[in-house]
Amino acid sequence: YHPRMGRGIYATRSIPNNTLIWTEDYTAHFTQGWQFRKFLMQVPPDIACDLMIWSYAIHDGSGSGAIVCSDLDAGSLLNEGSRRSEVNTVERNVEGGRGVYSMRAIDAGEQILMNYN
């Protein structure tokens, strides 16, 4: 737990530079708004509220649309560094989607932070 960011992910061991930390294997992708609404209606209301807070939109590649993504695993706990110097991961394309890699060595106990942009 971080006093300013709340819940987060912390390294339990040292992580070498360029290590794959997370993939979107358990990320739900919704290309239409009605799909996301239908999904939210299938889960208990308290979880639906959390999902609405934790979900995010990404560009769909067409230049004019977006995809709503909901991480259904620990990916929803990845916080954003408030300063560029705090960010210790980088997002890259991997086979089948996106992945988060360490962009430098991360010490045990250090929070894993990304850039949301």
Image (cartoon, rainbow, N blue to C red):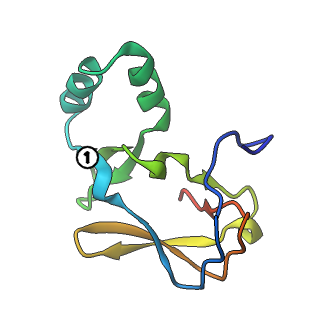
Residue 42 image position (x, y, % from top left): 23, 20
Q: Is residue 57 left or right of residue 84?
A: left
Instruction: Tell me how many marks there are.
Output: 1
- Residue 23: quadrant of the picture: bottom left
Q: Which residue appears at 28% of the width and 66% of the height?
A: 97
- Residue 37: quadrant of the picture: top left
Q: Is residue 66 visible?
A: no
Residue 73 image position (x, y, % from top left): 40, 47
Q: Which residue appears at 46% of the width and 52% of the height?
A: 75
Residue 104 image position (x, y, % from top left): 64, 82
Q: Is residue 58 above or below residue 52?
A: below
In terms of depth relative to the viewer, which is nearer, 74 or 61? 74
Residue furthest out toward the bottom: 17
Q: Is residue 58 left or right of residue 64?
A: right
Residue 55 image position (x, y, % from top left): 42, 39
Q: Is residue 84 visible?
A: yes
Q: Is residue 39 above or below residue 104?
A: above
Quadrant into which the N terminus falls: top right
Q: Which residue appears at 48% of the width and 37% of the height?
A: 54
Q: Is residue 94 above or below residue 5?
A: below
Q: Residues within 10 Å of mark 1 (few under 14, many from 20)?
A: some
Residue position for label 1: 29
Residue furthest out toward the top: 45
Q: Which residue appears at 42% of the width and 31% of the height?
A: 51
> What amino acid type is highlighted by mark number 1?
His
Q: Is residue 22 left or right of residue 98?
A: right
In terms of depth relative to the viewer, which is nearer, 92 or 22? 22
Q: Secondary structure at mark 1?
A: strand
Residue furthest out toward the right: 3
